[in-house]
Image (tube, rainbow, N blue to C red):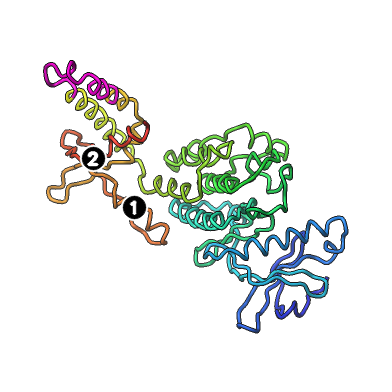
Amino acid sequence: MSQPQRLGKYQVTDVLGKGAMGVVYKAHDPDIERTVAIKTIRRELVEDDDRAGMVMARFKNEARAAGRLSHPGIVSVYDYGEAEDVAFIAMEFVEGNSLRAYFSRETQFEERDVVSLMAQLLDALQHAHEQGVWHRDVKPANIIIMNSGKLKVADFGIARIDSSSLTQVGAVMGSPGYMAPEQYKGNAVDWRADIFAAAVMLYQLLTGARPFTGSTEQLAYKVCYESPPPPSVVAPGRELERYDPVVARGLGKAPEERYASAAEFKAAILEAYAEPVEPHDLGVAAALRRQLAKDLRVDALRRPGVRRVHGDAVEEHLATAQALLQVDDGRIARRVRTVRDEDDGRPRMTTIGEEGKRRADGVVDGGTTGRLHFGKRRQQRFSVGGPVRQHARGVIEDEQ
């Protein structure tokens, strides 16, 4: 098929790419003087009676799905039309490279870049999900990183629109390696399939490796029945332990095991980034945990006869103290920090609070906030104030 000079009102200026379904052109919209990308279906596919119905349905579905979305992280669709027996979609022209191109070059992403890209991706997916659209084919090839560093989600060709009957239970649609277990099994699919695919990409961004590999048959089995090694094991030198539980939940085998929304997934990633655990903090957390348990025991038993008069409350205090001794030090270390006092320079403990929030907000906004300055290990001088103990106790409450 030769390059057309015009598609509808659009003046074709260049070829951007060719795929199995058609050609993508660069074009000019004369009405409002802007550059657009024109995605077309190849004539021979449309004229193939056996495939025409499915191809056209998917093509129109992409226009419908993306056309109802308006978000800076989603490639905008402007128009749908047919010209010279060619169906086309006019969409936003985006300059950049796909995430697949970065992976093919074995690019190693810095942590702040990983968090920034995932935050942008999940913001875009959250918007789509709120509009009743789930992508169902989230993968590196459909993620465009613009020259500005901003991200765009593209290709809603197999998107599911809430109440749409384009696909039914039993149809397997998606890309191997990024499909959720329910997609492989042909079960009902909702927005949580996008959560799974996003978790696969988080894993790949953190480690440089895909969590599931092999032939199509091997992929199907691994995705449905096996758990990949945690990111911290695959890339031991990158200190990724705090992301292990985040990735594991995103890769839950059943939809209900995953994050309930893209926004919740994003919040978990930002929390892990905002509150990195230093080896020194683990020692601090262990000491604090033991001190809190001791305080609870003393509070429970310090007055004669208190067990007889307030038996239930005492037993609850003692049970909480015992539970505190079992808490992972990393969970407390993510709530509190050791920093140098501004007045005398001695180490003291503080909560992560606003500092962690600024760190997380900074990476999403593209800025840099730096890390907290940690003092030397001098536990005997730690000032364990009420707010710090309250945050540590909050760890126990979260578990109950």
Q: Kindly state the secondary structure of the residue where label 1 is placed.
A: helix
* Magenta stretch holds residue 302: yes
Q: CA distance from mark 2 to mark 1?
A: 17 Å
x then y, percent, for residue 72: 52, 65
Q: Residue at x 13, y 50 (%)?
A: 343
Where residue 359 sits in the image (x, y, percent)? 35, 54
221 left or right of 371 in image: right
Give the residue type that dot 2 points to: Val
Which contiguous range is marked in magenta? 300-320
Q: Quadrant of residue 83?
A: bottom right
- Compare marks 2 and 1 and give the one earlier in the sequence: 1
Q: Amino acid at mark 1?
A: Lys
Q: Quadrant of the C terminus?
A: top left
Q: Secondary structure at mark 2?
A: helix
The front one of 250 and 186 is 186
The relative height of residue 134 versus residue 196 in the rendered view (above or below) is below
Q: Position of residue 67 (x, y in %)?
A: 62, 66
> Which residue corresponds to mark 1?
357
Q: Main secondary structure of the magenta part?
A: helix
Q: Residue at x 59, y 43 (%)?
A: 210
Residue 157 painted magenta = no
Q: Which residue is mark 2?
A: 388
Q: Tell me if residue 31 comes above or below residue 247 in the rendering.
A: below
Residues 276 and 52: in front is 52
Specify few, some or many for label 2: CA neighbours under 10 Å numbering under 14, 14-19, or 20 or more.
many
